[in-house]
Image (cartoon, rainbow, N blue to C red):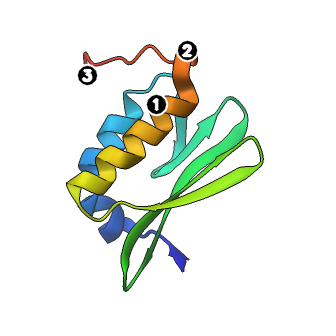
Amino acid sequence: MKHAGSDALDAIEDLLVSLRQRSALRERKRGIFYLQSRSFLHFHEDPAGIFADVSHAGDMVRLRVQIQRERKTLLAHVDAILGPLEPIDRSG
């Protein structure tokens, strides 16, 4: 499974915009997010779709993000991890 290229990231731009609203996350390269100084989330693509890898506290979870319902699941997972760290900036 290869890292998501530009076309795959274009296809999930709405998800990237939502992730960028989480002020605890920093996007160092398009589609690659860090929490504090650690790699937290990035995307892969393969024939089965686009997937997000979320790493936290030594665990890695891979979630498919091909359709809106799956993207909402990812955002809920991210928000559960961020918890009290995260005031969501919805102004942008």
Kind of residue sitting beneath label 2: Pro
Instruction: Tell me the CA gap for discs 3 and 1.
Output: 18 Å
Hey, what amino acid is under mark 1?
Asp
Q: Which mark is residue 79?
A: 1
* Res 92 label: 3
Q: Residue 57: horizontal and vertical position, in percent?
A: 75, 40
Look at the image and tell me in which quarter the N terminus lies. bottom right
| Residue reaching furthest to the bottom | 47
Q: Secondary structure at mark 1?
A: helix
Q: Residue at x 72, y 40 (%)?
A: 38
> Marks 3 and 1: CB-CB under 8 Å?
no
The quarter of the picture where residue 81 lies is top right
Mark 2 highlights which residue?
A: 84
In the image, residue 70 sits, relative to residue 86, either above or below, namely below
Image position of 47 with respect to 67: above or below: below
Instruction: Give the label, 2 or 3, closer to the camera.
Output: 2
Q: Quadrant of the C terminus?
A: top left
Mark 1 burial class by Cα count in 10 Å: few <14, some 14-19, many 20+: some
The answer to which quarter of the image holds residue 5 is bottom left
| Mark 3 or mark 1, whichever is nearer to me | 1
Report the residue at 31% width, 56% height from top: 70
Residue 61 location (% of width, % of height): 59, 56
In this picture, is 68 found above or below 48?
A: above
Q: Residues within 10 Å of mark 2 (few under 14, many from 20)?
A: few
Is the residue marked by circle 3 packed among few (<14), some (14-19), or many (20+) residues within 10 Å? Answer: few
Q: Is residue 24 visible?
A: no
The tag earlier along the polypeptide, 3 or 1, is 1
Tell me what residue is drawn at x 44 percent, y 13 percent.
87
Are the residues tagged 2 and 3 within 8 Å (C-beta)? no
Query: Residue 36 or 79: which is nearer the viewer?
Result: 79
Callout 3: SS: loop
